[in-house]
Amino acid sequence: QVQLVESGGGLVQAGASLRLSCAASGRTFNEDTMAWFRQAPGKEREFVAIDWNDGRTNYADSVKGRFTISRDNVLNTVYLQMNSLKLEDTAVYYCAASEDWGQSYHDWGQGTQVTVSS
């Protein structure tokens, strides 16, 4: 099992940037596929970004070109750099770990709130 703790959320104005961090501990982290999801009030949780740990990443269309996922396997941390934030990016952001290339996620963080104001 991997324990995941997100940080870096906050209240920012539209157009600003934030970097979220997700620190992992427990089982080996650097073999996992890592992803970010988010859930806005009254909405379903949705996929944001994925890092397959083989150089490949992918993003939801809504964040492509603005968000970047990256990881540091020495620090056991995955990041989500969020630029040009929009009001609709407001959500609780969760990181998640997968042992099967993103088919399923067995460990989740507690989430960090991102609020974008006008």
Image: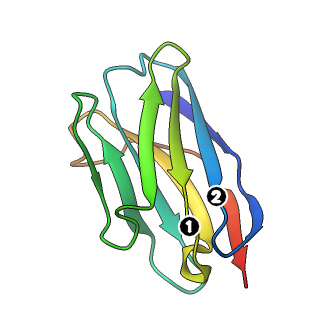
Left or right of 28: which side holds 31?
left
Of pointers 2 and 1, the one earlier in the residue sequence = 2
Local secondary structure at mark 2: loop
Indicate whether 15 appears above or below 28.
below
Frontmost residue, 58 versus 103 = 58
Residue 68's disc is none
Q: Amino acid at mark 2?
A: Ser
> Which residue is located at x 73 percent, y 85 percent?
118
Q: Please rate how many residues cluster around mark 2, counting C-alpha atoms within 10 Å: few if below 14, some from 14 to 19, many from 20.
A: some
Picture colour scheme? rainbow
> Which residue is located at x 62 percent, y 74 percent?
90
Left or right of 69: which side holds 33?
left
Q: Please rate how many residues cluster around mark 1, counting C-alpha atoms within 10 Å: few if below 14, some from 14 to 19, many from 20.
A: some
> Which residue is located at x 37 percent, y 73 percent?
62
Residue 110 visible in the picture: no
Local secondary structure at mark 1: loop
Residue assigned mark 1: 84
Residue assigned mark 2: 17
Residue 63 point in image, percent of width and height:
40, 66
The answer to whether marks 2 and 1 mark residues whose Cβ atoms lie closer than 8 Å is: yes
